[in-house]
Image (spheres, grey):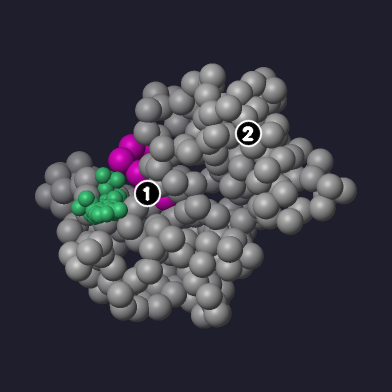
């Protein structure tokens, strides 16, 4: 049986007393790519933030590789192998790509002697970063910034990657070029991915399973092939 990377049970969460997630449960297996879709404001980003310890749930619990973490903080989750690439890139505009990577390696506690190997690994997955690694992030295109943001997460060798709408602002072809090599990491490294996406066509092409969220609840779970155009229209 494939190990379970993330098991979330009965999660509820909200903001200022308004409940956004309502009793949500999900299982992400090792090496699986799970795609989460849903209308704007459904609660997808909130769920990712809860799973990365950035937002405290009001109920429920999460196990990472079978363990309940003592402190459910981003640092504890990072140490357990979970990385989040938030919506909107979030790269420091005044730093060069090399500086951003250096900072990420430093904050992950990777010793100097191991840093070269980590960077080479990332450049193997996202080779186009080589073309702009000495440039300041603020001068890069949206697609390039997205690569840097994902590259930064990959430097920590995550076992689970939480990706929040990586296609935003990208042409479909660019998104394809970005997501496919990352998706391939599930075979080469057994990495699991929870992918929140609106670009259904490309996201479904790399996903094993799909969850549809509406108003803080999952209303569908199944294989991408089960969601043809008509069924998608009905669920949205
Ligand atoms: N920091 C916050 N404070 C208050 N309300 C928030 C906050 N973040 C999100 N919300 C609200 O919570 C609800 C769910 O938002 P969330 O960002 O999780 O949805 P989403 O499914 O990721 O949407 P989108 O596809 O637009 O990113 C929305 O009504 C949103 O306005």
In the figure, residue 127 lies in which quadrant?
A: top right
- Which comes before the other along the chain, label 1 or label 2? 2
Position of residue 151 relative to residue 35, above or below, is: above
Task: Report crowding for label 1: few under 14, some 14 to 19, many 20 or more residues within 10 A (C-alpha).
Answer: many
Does residue 30 appear in this view? Answer: no
Vertical order, 213 against 69 (above or below): above
Tell me: 181 left or right of 198: right
Horizontally, residue 199 falls left or right of residue 184, namely left
Mark 1 close to ligand 1, CB under 8 Å: yes
Beta carbon of the mark 2 residue lies under 8 A of ligand 1: no
The answer to whether any part of residue 145 appears in the image is yes
Nearest to the observer: residue 173 or residue 216: 216
The boundaries of the magenta stretch are: 195-204
Residue 201 painted magenta: yes
Give whichever of 180, 160 is nearer the camera.
160
Disc 1 target residue? 196
Tell me which residue sits at (47%, 37%) in the image.
89
| Residue labelled with disc 2 | 126
């Amino acid at each position: 049986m494939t190990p379970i990377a993330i098991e979330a049970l009965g999660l509820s969460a909200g903001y200022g007393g308004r409940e956004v997630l309502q009793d949500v449960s999900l299982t992400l297996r090792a090496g699986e790519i799970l795609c989460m879709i849903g209308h704007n404001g459904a609660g997808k980003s909130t769920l990712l933030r809860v799973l990365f310890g950035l937002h405290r749930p009001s109920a429920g619990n999460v196990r990472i590789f079978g363990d309940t973490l003592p402190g459910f903080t981003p640092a504890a989750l990072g140490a357990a192998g979970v990385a989040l690439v938030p919506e909107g890139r979030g790269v420091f505009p005044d730093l060069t790509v090399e500086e951003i990577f250096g900072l990420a390696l430093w904050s992950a506690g990777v010793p100097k002697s191991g840093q070269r190997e980590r960077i080479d690994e990332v450049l193997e997955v996202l080779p186009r970063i080589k073309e702009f690694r000495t440039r300041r992030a603020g001068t890069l295109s949206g697609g390039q910034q997205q690569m840097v943001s994902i590259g930064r997460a990959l430097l920590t060798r995550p076992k689970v990657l939480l990706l929040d709408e990586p296609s935003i602002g990208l042409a479909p072809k660019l998104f394809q070029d970005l997501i496919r090599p990352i998706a391939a990491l599930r075979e080469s490294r057994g990495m699991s991915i929870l992918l929140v996406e609106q670009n259904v066509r490309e996201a479904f092409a790399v996903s094993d399973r799909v969850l549809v969220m509406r108003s803080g609840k999952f209303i569908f779970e199944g294989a991408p092939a089960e969601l043809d155009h008509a069924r998608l229209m009905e669920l949205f």
